[in-house]
Amino acid sequence: MRMPIEEAFCRILICPATRQGLEKASDFHLAGLNRAIGGHRVRTQGGALVEQPLQEALITKDGARIYPVRDGIPVLLVEESIVMENAGQR
Amino acid sequence: MVEHRYSEGSTREAEKAHVSRMGNTDGLMSKPFLSGGSLSVEIAQVEIAIFSAMVGCLPVGPGSLVLDLGSGPCWVSDWLRKLKYRTCSMDICFDMLRFGLRRMGPGSWACVADMAAIPLSDNSVDAVVCHAALHHVPDWRSAIAEVYRVLRPGGVFVVQEPGRGHSKQSESIAQMDQFGVLEQDMPPGLLVKACRAAGFSRAIVRPVAELSHGLIRVLPPYAFFRDAPRLFIHKNIRRLLVSIVERLLNLWAPIHLVVAMKGTPYVDSSRPDVMVARFRSIDFRTELNPACPTPIRVSVHNTGLTRWLAEACDDSGLGRVRLGVSRLDENRKIVDLDFLRLSLPHDVNPGETVELSGEVPPLAMTGRAVIRLDMVSEGVCWFSDKGSRPVYLDVQVREQAGDGGCVCR
């Protein structure tokens, strides 16, 4: 069962790599990212190929890094984050 | 400290995959209670005793945000939520948190994270608890530094870890061999030193003593002292005795908590200690117009031992401190207890003074009346019930009243 992240929770979350604040990724961001995932062009920072499209994600304020949210649980590990330039170009 | 058997990367991956290698996961949902023979009654007793002792060390009350670090299947978070704390469960193993969310239900906060890089903003949580998780982390000193960063000033870190000899126990060796996880000895003295090095102003060891035959007792508050006639044992004497007994017990108690404080950990008004207010100055007219609101400005000093919360931590409003203005008749009988409330502009620590201002509604009568000022912790108590002295203002309500004299105390 997928539960959306509460706004209050989102407000205290930060990126563990850059310590920037995080916000929910927009449908626009997710759609673009999922297109790239469908084309097998997205890898996590740890190098793993992302195969499943993202239903929900958190994005850094500068839009450079995305963290997946699975079953309502943000996965805030640097190695599992997606650097956005990788998403569109690889 | 036993040397690491594995590299940092391998133990990290082992922790992430822990649930998938476990096979029988029935115990995760029922922890700390028994399930499928995975726990013994004695172990369950120990877990419950540790939880109770940890809660006893939290200075903050219901509604406060507690980070459950290395939460595993979130049973500590689940129990804290039953005590009306807000929790954020954090673990590096996604599957553990999935069990936890199933257990806690919707609205629970959980995230997968590395303890050495906690993804929470600075000063964002009121307390951090960590039950038997830090000793699995290779870079545990960085984790303590991160705890210090995310705690708000006045927050506490309550941690319980296995002590000397843990890594050599057969069960620990089996865990390391079978699952590849890291098991370390983490005696309380080591934790205390690390907490101080991370910046904590104070770190103390508290025993969770295990008596013989598997009988577990959480010593503070000690039943012996609690049951003694209160007339003969003053609170401070009791505290001193408890402190002495605690130090003695530390010599042999097998289970310890380490409580580290970031600044002065005041209890707050949702779980108060001594709550006393002194009204330093009051600007209020003594002659009131029955049809017009009257401005009031008050300066209040927190002379107690409790931090006054300006806002409640949740929707219940519990523990929010406000100035309560009551309306009394000339014989000081209550006419309207909740005549007016004035909110604090910010939290007020012991020793601090706060200025409040507002307008007292028209009394809609003429003649003599009394206005009573007292602080109130909503849903908890009026300060006067705890020994604080309210202020009574005698006022005259008359038509055409102009600027009357000010009452200043």
Image (tube, coloured by chain):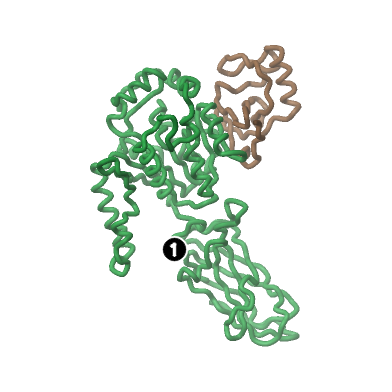
Chain colours: A brown, B green
Task: Decide if residue A54 is on the left or right side of residue B111.
Answer: right
At 52% from the left and 65% from the top, the residue drawn is B381
Q: Quadrant of the N terminus of chain B?
A: top left
- The residue carrying mark 1 is B274
Q: Please give the chain letter of the residue carrying mark 1.
A: B
Identity, as a three-letter code, of the amino acid under mark 1: Val
Task: Decide if residue B5 is on the left or right side of residue B277.
Answer: left
Q: Is residue B244 above or below residue B20?
A: below
For the question of whether residue B273 can be seen, the reply is: yes
Q: Is residue B374 above or below residue B146?
A: below
The picture places residue B367, in percent across and down from the top left corner, at 68, 87
Task: Decide if residue B90 is on the left or right side of residue B244.
Answer: right
At 36% from the left and 42% from the top, the residue drawn is B258
Tell me which corner region of the image, top left, top right, bottom left or bottom right, holds residue B145.
top left
Mark 1: which secondary structure?
A: loop
Total labels: the figure holds 1
At 66% from the left and 29% from the top, the residue drawn is A62
The picture places residue B336, in percent across and down from the top left corner, at 64, 75
Tell me which corner region of the image, top left, top right, bottom left or bottom right, holds residue B297.
bottom right
Residue at the outermost front position: B36
